[in-house]
Image (tube, rainbow, N blue to C red):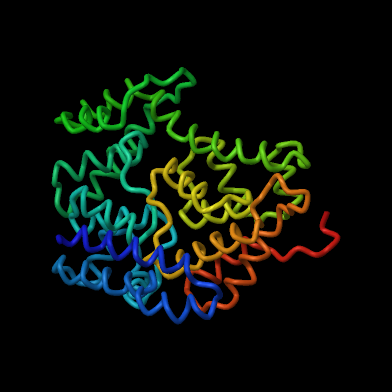
Amino acid sequence: MNQNQENNFETVYIKDEIGKCEDIDELKERIFPMIKTQQEQWIRKINDIITESGLTKSKFADICGVSRVAVNKWCNGSIPKNRETFLRIGMAACYGREKMDQLLQRYGQYPALYAKSLEDCVCIFVLDKEYGEETLTKYNYILDKIKENIIRSDEAAEDMSTVLFDEKLSNIKSEDELEMFITDNTAIFSSTYHKFYAYVKMHIMANYQDFGGSVFDLAEGQRWSSSLRQCVSAIRQGKWYPTRNKIISLGLHLSMDHEQIDEMLELAHMEPLCAKNAFESVIMFILDDASLNNMLDTESEEFDPDDLCRYAREVLKEFDLPEVESFITELPEMDDDAW
């Protein structure tokens, strides 16, 4: 059995074991010893990156465009707050595409590089050209130049598979060819987010008729946090997808089950919920338990669209995990007369 097969086996095994847990204490006792938190994984990873780069922390910070204090915080367990920072770290480490994807997905819990995203398209190009320590500088220069000249398109996008799009991108030899390629495919870049948002809107329309199927009315009724509102607004405006945890939070607010949240993550070009991540193992337990207790049955006369968020909040409060503090702010407590 190779390493990938072993990792997959372990993930499936832990996922099955989570489904067998009857309460929080059992989850802590049986599951947590088998997995490490995202923070623990990140500390080991970022220190390895800096050591392998052969650079001082100060030099690494300069290349990333951050302070040495920021790099020190990373090395002590502070996880970067956005996807762009992970891209900068990967480029400073002179990563190729495979390692960059692993960094984004495993350690940042962000989507892998996706050629139909403008920023990622440029990133893939510069990684392929192996500019070394100049990779990040080249990335910023090319991206800024293209953004100055590109005109967003409202035309219907050509039906081109991601595989074919990747192949066309891999054949580009120069910066001028890249700029022409992006200009010729502006409609594709503009439509990258449509399927994801359509899926979210479908669930709003299906489950929240009391709010008129409106994102605004739903957000008002459930008293969404400003950051959750902003992530939906960003999707509607054609900006980059929200963070992984924002998508999971959105799924809870829309009373999605485990399978539906996994489908939403897939549409955002992310991996499904991971049983080997401590925080996500708790989310999986919440979803499985809520489903067993008919909390997600939207056809039931007793269905309450706030039940899942309230339940998730109560469970998460029992765990001392680095992700919980910020995530739980997305799940405000509802008083009895909120409706």
Q: Is residue 222 left or right of residue 313?
A: right
Residue 287: x and y in percent read 55, 59
Whether residue 40 is situated above or below residue 270 in the rendered picture: below
> Seen in the image, is 82 located left or right of residue 251?
left
Depth order, front residue of 50/25: 25
Towards the viewer: 133 or 126: 126
Which residue is situated farthest in the right direction here? 337
Quadrant assignment, res 337: bottom right
301 vs 161, nearest the viewer = 301
Q: Toward which corner of the image does residue 1 lie, by quadrant?
A: bottom left
Relative to 60, residue 217 above or below: above
Find residue 223 and report its horizontal and vertical position in percent. 72, 55
**Which quadrant of the structure image shows residue 333?**
bottom right
Q: Residue at x 35, y 33 (%)?
A: 116
Residue located 32% across and 60% down the image:
106
- In the image, 216 versus 16, the foreground residue is 16
- For image coordinates 49% across by 69% down, the residue present is 323
Residue 194 in the image: x percent, y percent?
49, 32
287 left or right, relative to 207: left
